[in-house]
Amino acid sequence: MNNALDDIGWRAFYPAYAVLTRHIDHKDDEVARNIKIMMRKLILRMPHQCMWQSAYLLRQNIAGIKEKYMEVLADVKRNAPCYVTIIDQYDYASGIFNQISTKVDSSECRLSERVEGMKILFRDKKYDAKELEMNRRLDGDCKVFNGIMVPIRSVIDESVHYPEYGGDNDAEKACQLPDQYLIHDFSEHVKVLHSNTKPVLIELTTMAGRKVRLICKKNDDLTKDYHFNKIVEMCNDLLMKDEQTKIQNMAATTFSVIPLAKHGGIIEFIEGVTPYYDTLDTIMQLKQNEWSGKLSKWKDEMSKLKSRESRAEYFREVACKQTPIVMSKWFRIQYPEAGKWFASRKQFAKSAAVMSIIGYIFGLGDRHTKNLMIHLQTGKCIHVDFDMIFNKGETLGTPELVPFRLTQNMINGMGEVALDGEFRTVCEQTLRVFRENSYEIEKYISDLPNLVADFASNKMAPKDFDMTEAKRLVSGRIRGQIMTVKLHKSKAITYPMQVSQLTSSLIDLATSDEKLCEMFPGWMPTL
């Protein structure tokens, strides 16, 4: 194990760094020692990349982990003075970025006035040693070495394979990152986004002149978003290895998530997208108070109906019929050229299907109209906000009853054949690939940290639900059984469904009026 990095090569071993950080507190002393050795070697080779991936450990304050991580960093610092500066400046940078969503409360303010550390770091090229989490001291402002890397996973991963980067046992060269990957400056203009946690949108400029926008969030535990994005990447890899799905270019869109503390972090802003609700709203042109009035009226009327059958009938005959079906019209307006129109609708159905199955397998909920995005250039359906995973949606005050979003406007956007065309075929192909690669998926999730810890404080969640049970349910769903935390309990896989049967059952559940009429009104089940 000690020689694994040297045998495999540090570039090839780099993807394992995130896994190593999760096991830094391994119970076996020998394993823990080897993990720390490999982390140290990787940080020595790629300090910028590794620090962005693990600096959050300094501010999570998890017993034992922070101390062990600081031991690794202290060992790295002893190798050369440049490592001292690099580690300190990323310690400072992660703290400064984490302050943005806390200190910026208006879109009218200037970023450098609210978060002075941004000016110190990127314009003065310094960092304040009094603000460090590790080795805090009274040195005053210290000079930054080389610069701060752009905190986006695609940029970080690309830099690892830059041909001229890194050198054998050359500390100075390892710490000198090419300019194209470094942050040059930031825009003073910010935007506070409309959301419960009020995330802040900022813009950075790289040394190469590229504009990069990031969302800074507070209060949310972004480790869930980070790990779910990694799950989606793993699923994409499986789809790309299969001959049939590779030809169809079946994949879900992912984005960079970098946690900076226990609560808070940086999310890559996806350019060229608009919320699913906004695409419909451009055609419907209903004012917010009109929608609120409709939703309130439908909710009041359905609450008076005692049976689910009568509520489903009201939902189908009144609520759905009073909701404009406009998605197909949006596609015609957005893509007036016939070839683009056809390709975009096909891409919409395909991307929706892939993510629907991934979401079902891993229990993704909260798929309301603002958590689905439409990529305006391609029509691709992109999902964001992965806080509710492993069927957490079933434990809400108003439980989520459907496996994924497949409402009447979604179906309308998929073309004349709708559910009997691209969507169903891609769902079946995705399920087939996952079932054929069940071992790889189970092996991957076996290494995940506890992502259901918040279930313990949820009175609606089963008391005995833990990560082991969450993984068991994932395995059951892959193998062909509809199993969830509360609504579809099952202890054993007796008669698993074939791929086509499971697809049909899931589509029936997702489009069931009996299920949709019980959904939370803000989820907008009629849209």
Image (cartoon, grey):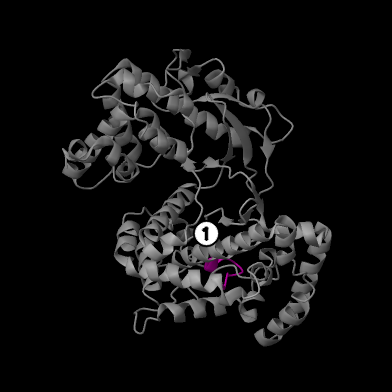
The image quadrant that residue 436 belongs to is: bottom left
Q: Position of residue 385 (x, y in %)?
A: 56, 53
Q: Position of residue 356 (x, y in %)?
A: 52, 66
Q: Quick one: label 1, few (<14), some, or many (20+) residues within 10 Å?
A: many
Q: Give the structural element (helix, strand or loop) at label 1.
A: loop
Residue 135 visible in the snapshot: no
Q: In the rendered structure, which amino acid carries the disc numbered 1?
A: Met
Q: Magenta segment, principal secondary structure?
A: loop
The quadrant where residue 369 appears:
bottom right
Q: Residue at x 36, y 52 (%)?
A: 449
Q: Is residue 404 above or below residue 121?
A: below
Left/right of residue 213 with respect to residue 82 in the rendered view: right
The N terminus - image quarter: top left
Q: Residue at x 72, y 80 (%)?
A: 316
Look at the image and say whether residue 340 sits in the magenta stretch: no
**Depicted 113 relative to depicted 513: above or below:** above
The answer to which quarter of the image holds residue 47 is top left
**Residue 45, position as x, y percentages in the image:** 30, 29
Residue 526 located left or right of residue 468? right
Decide which of 502, 159 is in the foreground and name it. Answer: 159
Residue, disc 1: 388
Q: Give the residue drawn at x 47%, y 62%.
A: 248
Q: Is residue 19 above or below residue 102?
A: below
Magenta highlight range: 393-402
At 49% across and 69% down in the image, what residue appears?
A: 426
Residue 395 painted magenta: yes
Q: Is residue 269 visible?
A: yes
Count of numbered marks: 1
Residue 342 coordinates in the image, percent (x, y): 63, 63
